[in-house]
Amino acid sequence: MSKTYWVETYGCQMNLSDSELMEGVLASSGYAQVSAPEDADVILVNTCAIREHAEQRVLGRVAELNRVKRERPGTLIGVCGCMAQRLGTQLIERAEHVDMVIGPDAYRSLPQLIDQAARDGGGVVDVELKDSENYEGLELRRKSQVSAWIPIQRGCDYRCTFCIVPFTRGPEKNREPDAVLREIEEQAAEGITEFTLLGQTVNSYRYGDWDFPRLLRAVARLPGVRRVRFTSPHPNDLTRGLVEVMAEEDAVCPQLHLPVQSGSDRVLKRMARRYTRAEYMAKVGMLRDAIPHIALGTDIIVGFPGEDETDFEATLDLVRSVRYDDAFTFRYSAREGTPSTRMDQDWVVPDHVAQGRLERLIALVREIAAEKNLAEVGKVAGVLVEKRARRGDLLQARTDTYKVVLIPGPEDWIGRYMRVALTGTSGATFTGFPVEP
């Protein structure tokens, strides 16, 4: 009988892609996936370390999973990813029911690490960052037959003062362009038509004489590729050449998530973001001049050390000016080892003040997004049908601007491109019906 596994994923798109990688490694070693952790010989929790709340949530979930070990002796629990990399052996000390702590550069060795944990009764830690590890030659277990994540870069050379990623993912490592193009060609030949290029600062990609605009254009022109996205870019690397590729290549979607973090130059300088508000706004203007209908998203942190009400009002003003389609908003979370934790303690923003600012920001973001979405109702949009929706007998589809549309229809529509009339919106999601295939 084959051994069984269960993988849970928390965090960003890179973590989702890494989970596909881990599942591929396990499947290649004879492991079978099960539909619930209660049936698994090995439970892997792939984690995020970007905020303290994310780590606390994982610790709570791992404690819940310990009941599986009690009810099913011999089950192994592993914590993987950025939180594992950050805490290392401390994680086993804090949660003694954890058998394995596995960093992002150790997934190739998963079967061996599992065997070691089974033999030694746990206590396995592998958090070595390996400069050469790009996971070439390993097969992923794709979750979707419609869209695919394509990691082109790991790690980060920027040193934003709030960010733990350079410490958990290491320095920037870029894949060979031929390997990236070959992977996409293979997936396109199997029927996948939408691809998202992934990297911590994806548009800083460079390999030999290849830069990111050249790679993006090459991907967009591959046979079978109908949609290309990329995330997450850094504003500093958003060049005119990249914007030209986005505007000229039909397969590149008119949508971009462009993190700003703050609208205040004082705060941006403390964050070491390496651009000013004016420079960021110039990039937004360049995008909209070239692609007038582009949908923009962003990341924003409130309550960063030293942020006062004037700084926060500058952020609200920037949001009103840009009018984002979506935004991920966060209250600043101190991460041990990052430079921001060494800033003057007098700069710390009280929790209740930061929370109040976050709530005001969320309200503004939602108000603008709802206004923009309401203006789309009654129009016809092209969508790719992705999967069955979570509720009702509906299908989930997505526009090229990354808006979700729920439509009625049979399951064999999944993977098709259709034209749909947008009939309503809840503020974040549209309803619609097909008007032509």
Image (cartoon, rainbow, N blue to C red):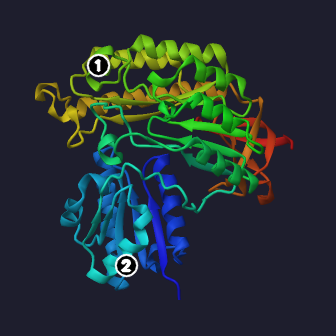
Q: Position of residue 340 (x, y in %)?
A: 22, 32
Determine crowd level at label 1: few under 14, some 14-19, many 20+ residues with C-alpha closer than 10 A.
some
Q: Choose between 201 and 411: the one closer to the eye.
A: 201
Using the numbered discs, state the Cα–Cα distance from disc 2 to disc 1 in whole angstroms: 48 Å
Determine crowd level at label 2: few under 14, some 14-19, many 20+ residues with C-alpha closer than 10 A.
few
Q: Choose between 335 and 436: the one closer to the eye.
A: 335
Q: Which residue is mark 2?
A: 115
- Image disc number at residue 354: none
Residue reaching furthest to the front: 208
Q: Is residue 130 above or below residue 216?
A: below
Residue reaching furthest to the bottom: 1
Q: Which residue is mark 1?
A: 269
Residue 110 as seen in the image, left or right of residue 93 = right
Q: Is residue 161 above or below residue 155?
A: above
Answer with mark 2 or mark 1, whichever residue precedes in sequence.
2
Kind of residue at badge 2: Asp
